[in-house]
Image: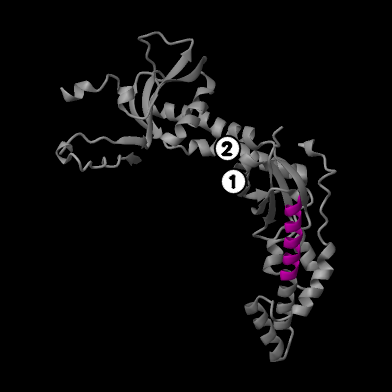
Amino acid sequence: MVRVKQRYLLFTILYPSSPQSTTNNGSNSSSKPTQSMIFHSPSPANLTRTSLASIIRSSISNNFGDWGIGQCGSFAVKYFSQATSTGILRITRDNYRTLWAALTYVRELCGQPAVIKVVRVSGTIRKAELEAVKLAEETIRRVKREVRDTKSGAGGGNGNGDKKGVAGIFSGGKSGRPVTAANDDEQDEMVVDIVDSENDDDDEE
Amino acid sequence: MDIDAPQAPAIVNANPKKTKTGGEKRFTVRKPEWQYLHLRMTFDPPHPPTFTSPSYPPDLLTWKTHLSTALNQFLGIAGTAIPVDFLHLDGPEVWMRLPREDATRFMAAIGGWGSEIEGRSVGFRVLGSTEFLMGIVGGDGRDIFV
């Protein structure tokens, strides 16, 4: 008996311009969103696993026709989180490049321009999940750093705060504040909630 | 295009006089760049032998339109991106040239296509497919050297 080999594609959706929901949130809080907050903003609520699947399927059909649908129409959206705009797709190993190409050709989601970026291709869903958690942590850390830097740059009257902010930008924030970064890690531990794929229904597509 | 020239035969030192000077050179063309196709547009019910009208025999733009429709259905945008050169138009038949790597999927796409135009069902038939133009021009090519 030969096992069917699969590939799991971890992807994130990037929004070059701020979607509607983020602008509302931004106006509520006092600080305006930084660039990476806009880029990694949450997806609209009507973008679900099923609607995402139909968008991807229409992209495959448009770019690769009946042949493409026949080859990789059997993909499954194993996981999608609107909060982090991150998801995992499952596809047979021979066809993952076609699916990847179709993802790349998606230009807008729910009426707003978007880019789907494949972050990792993995043979097991476990590794893709781990990468998703790591990715979310990194994103939050980066956003926090940016917010802190802009605050210290604008609000801090003394020159010391300014210097710290600039140094943080150039060092990538690594050497500047190792202690706070470690604290951030603990706080962000529970941000991403990955569904248990083993109990997931594979054949919902 | 890969041209595979065989290595020069090892020179046998024992009998140097037997090595040919200026003998025949052989090479094998392994992966030609182009594939040449001979296609016919088929109509059902067929046109009478001497029938002509503004839409028959089809002109090259009609050919291009129908081929693009077929390719778009089967292969999507990726299929319409296959570059096609029409070499010769002869009644409902055409000679054309396309990259060799795309020939298989091209023939699969147009072979499975059918449509209804002016009350007749239209399709394509591949009459010939070859890596060298001589294959569809016909003959054994000997008349060139006469």
Q: Nearer the viewer, residue A13 or B30?
A: B30
In the image, taking residue A61 as reference, residue A42 lies left or right, namely right
Q: Secondary structure at mark 2?
A: helix
| Badge 2: residue crowd in 10 Å (few <14, some 14–19, many ≥20) | many
Are the residues at dot 1 and dot 2 in contact (C-beta closer than 8 Å)?
yes
Figure check: A177 above or below A5: below
Does the magenta run of residues contain B135? no
Report helix, strand or loop for mark 1.
Answer: helix
In the figure, B49 relative to A147: above or below?
Answer: above
Identify the magenta region. Answer: A126-142
Q: Are marks 1 and 2 on the same chain?
A: yes
* Residue under the image location 73 percent in, 53 percent down: A128
Numbered badge on residue A64: 2
Q: Dot 1 surroundings within 10 Å: few (below 14), some, or many (20 or more)?
A: some
Direction top: furthest residue: B48
Front position in the image: A159 or B30 = B30
Q: Is residue B97 visible?
A: yes
Task: Give the Cα distance between marks 1 and 2.
Answer: 10 Å
Residue A141 within the magenta-colored segment of the rendering: yes
Residue occupied by mark 1: A101
Identity of the amino acid at label 2? Answer: Phe
Q: How is the image coloured?
A: one colour
Above or below A205: residue B135: above
